[in-house]
Image (cartoon, rainbow, N blue to C red):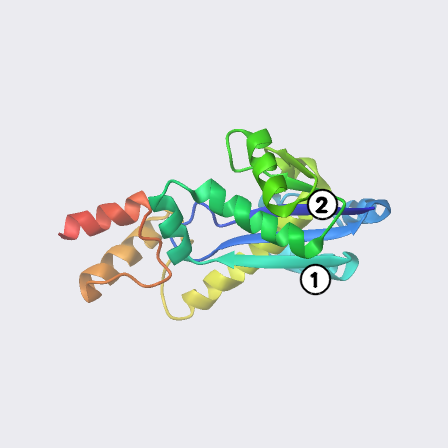
Amino acid sequence: MQICGVDDAGRGSMLGPLVIAGISLEKTNIHKLSLLGVKDSKQLSPKSREELYKKIIILVDDYYVAKISPKSIDASVKKHGLNHLEAKYMAKVISKLNPDISYVDSCDVNPQRFGKEIAKLSNNKIKSYHHADSRFVVVSAASIIAKVTRDRAIDKLRKNHDLGSGYPSDSKTINFVKSYYEKNHILPVFVRKSWKPTQKILNKSL
């Protein structure tokens, strides 16, 4: 019986992609993830995540990663459809892996509603929970794959830009977006224009 875990990374960030990752493996092998030391990516150091990433992709039967661009995110936010966008991409990841059952980390306040939407889109059996990344090791493994993929994408941008963590709570990120816009009168393609802090910067400059 193939079990799948799906999670996202970078949902709250002002810049870079939103990453959705899924892993699938035989039910009898799930305990092997725990033996590796797999847990919610937020509880691990970047170094541990990198090491576990390599071990996870060797252990699992299959995995799939999808990146959602800031442009797509902005278009969905405009229609108040960010949860739907995420459900659509989670369904895409699950359809690629084609497991018997999938556990997903719900971004919707109503996990059942979120699960039903993914089930409808993927034609798959879905178990949707809040904090699934800390409750189910298959989702923890997916959270590590998603986080490492996202961190690598940000590191790539960091080679040319001093942009901090990418999150609105980081003054370095806010200052980067602000000074880039003041200097160039446009925003980089990797910045999410629909985010409130970005809107604030744009409106102040008008």
Tag 1: residue type?
A: Lys
- Can you give x and y, in whole percent of width and height, for residue 12 in the image? 43, 45
Tag 2: residue type?
A: Val
Within-10-Å neighbours for mark 1: few <14, some 14–19, many 20+: few
Question: Which secondary structure, mark 1?
Answer: helix
Q: Which of marks 2 and 1 is in front?
A: 2
Give above or below for 53 relative to 91.
below
Within-10-Å neighbours for mark 2: few <14, some 14–19, many 20+: many
Identity of the residue furthest to the bottom in this view = 160
Res 148 seen here: yes
Q: Which residue is at a point 68% across and 49% down the rendered structure image?
A: 141
Direction from residue 115 to residue 59 in the image, left or right: right
Residue 54: numbered disc:
1
Tell me which corner region of the image, top left, top right, bottom left or bottom right, holds residue 49: bottom right
Q: Find disc 2 in the rendering and name its residue.
A: 138
Is 11 or 2 nearer to us in this picture?
2
- Can you give x and y, in whole percent of width and height, for residue 86 in the image? 51, 46
